[in-house]
Image: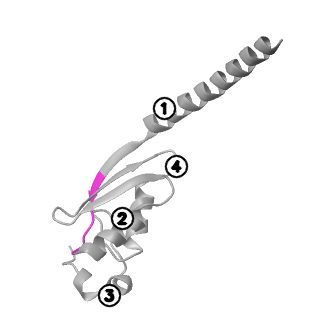
Amino acid sequence: MITKALIFITAIMFWFVQGFSVQTTQDQSQNKSAEFKVYGECGMCKTRIENAAKIEGVKSATWDKETQMLKIDFNPSTVKLTDIHKSIVKVGHDTDKEKAQDEIYKKLPACCKYERP
């Protein structure tokens, strides 16, 4: 009797764990990568840009000061690239598709003022 109960519990646990591993694989396969230009100048810009890019659906965001390119991994069923661009311009940084409002750009610290395209 105990053996049948253990086999049943083991089978249920295996089925449960298997279901989660399949779901995780499906979620990862839906992720996409993208790269686009975001203007900035310094380490403070890097922090501000990456934080602004990390909205719901964005798995990772890394901005390179030298190339001024932002690399992101995101789930396109959760977030659109245009939403990420809009989130970044709200903190004062222009992208290759959106421009920050002048009032917001002017509030950036002096070291963060970049040459606007």
Q: CA distance from mark 4 to mark 2?
A: 18 Å
Between 48 and 3, the one lying in front of the other is 3
For residue 25, the mark is: 1
Residue at image coords 41%, 67%:
52
Look at mark 4 in the image and give the residue it sits on: 78
In the image, the segment drawn in magenta is: 35-41
Look at mark 3 in the image and give the residue it sits on: 106
Q: Is residue 32 left or right of residue 115?
A: right
Q: Is residue 5 left or right of residue 104?
A: right
Look at mark 2 in the image and give the residue it sits on: 50
Q: CA distance from mark 3 to mark 2?
A: 20 Å
Question: Reading the chain from its start, which is encountered first: label 1 or label 3?
Answer: 1
**Tag 3: amino acid:** Lys
Q: How is the image coloured?
A: one colour
Q: CA distance from mark 1 to mark 2?
A: 26 Å
Between 4 and 72, the one lying in front of the other is 4
Furthest residue toward right: 1
